[in-house]
Amino acid sequence: MALYASMLERWPVPYTPLEIPTRHGSTFVVASGEASAPPLVLLHGAGTNSAMWLGDIAEYSRRHRVLAVDLLGEPGKSAPHRPSWRGPAYAEWMEDVVDALGIDSAAIVGLSQGGWTALKFAVSQPERVSTLALLSPGGVVPDKLSFVVRALPLMLLGRRGLARINRMVLGGRSVPAEVEEAMITLMTHFRTRLGVLPIFTDAELQRLTMPTLVVMGLRDALRDAEKISARLRKLLPNLTATILPEQGHALLGSHTYVLPFLADCRD
């Protein structure tokens, strides 16, 4: 929490912290941008929190009211409660969050488990999602078993092993030392949720008629970018798919490809 607080102190734009009660637990939201601007919901990935948007938030906030939401049960300020992935809980939770924020319909950007959460809500209430941007999303095809096989032994090697896992997640790309240190701190002190995200059915995914962007890194160690893009192309009528050859799972600089997509959808 001290690390999270220190990162929020460096938030580059004015923000309002919000605590939202939901039927599945209190939820923390970092609200930035003009209140009258079009709403944009950001959902981070597993093992992190809304501070992961630190490098993108200034650009996202220029033309949007940005609501960066801490997922339940992750190392943020939302409740530690971890509902089942298989029931309706995450769609219910998202419904409570957007209701409390007074949002009828919003653009949603989700990374990894955040992408799965965005999908869960979108297939449940597609009319409330104006545009959808999925970054390395879970729930489309099964994850690569090879990542788990490689990562588990590395977890026994302390900081050196965690640094190697980070390099796998980043697809070999380098990040500032302070970012890598934050990643290692979270991996060291947070008890990661175990389990497998359920795969959405064809019928569920076919409900996604809104403009949808999927962005994957070709070096993604967790998920197969080409298989995910291929399946979504078959099922989603309004899909834009982008595979970045030099990126891994933890996509860097997401605003550079999400914002042009959102602008095109508005036009």
Image (cartoon, grey):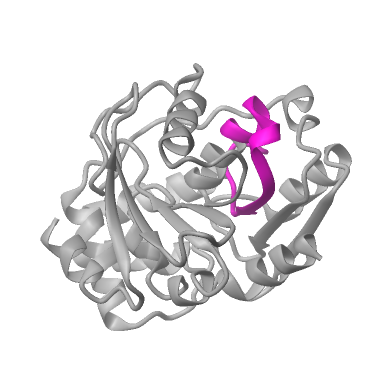
Q: Residue at x 43, y 29 (%)?
A: 96
Q: Is residue 127 magenta?
A: yes
13 vs 132: above or below? below
Q: Nearer the viewer, residue 69 or 96?
A: 96
Tally of numbered discs: 0
Instruction: Measuring from the top left, give residue 210's x and y in whole percent.
Output: 77, 44
Q: Residue furthest left?
A: 2
Q: Is residue 224 magenta?
A: no
Residue 243 appears in the rendering: no
Instruction: Measuring from the top left, give residue 28's x and y in whole percent.
Output: 29, 45
Q: Nearer the viewer, residue 179 or 65?
A: 65
Which quadrant does the C terminus fall into? bottom right
Q: Residue furthest top?
A: 87
Residue 153 appears in the rendering: yes
Which quadrant does the N terminus fall into? bottom left
Instruction: Measuring from the top left, give residue 105's x and y in whole percent.
Output: 62, 42
200 vs 141: above or below? above
Instruction: Measuring from the top left, give residue 256's x and y in whole percent.
Output: 62, 76
139 vs 34: above or below? above
85 vs 250: above or below? above
Q: Nearer the viewer, residue 199 or 235?
A: 235
15 relative position to 207: left or right: left
Q: Residue at x 80, y 31 (%)?
A: 206
167 relative position to 5: left or right: right
203 relative position to 158: left or right: right
Q: Residue at x 34, y 27 (%)?
A: 22
Please give the range of residues in magenta: 120-140
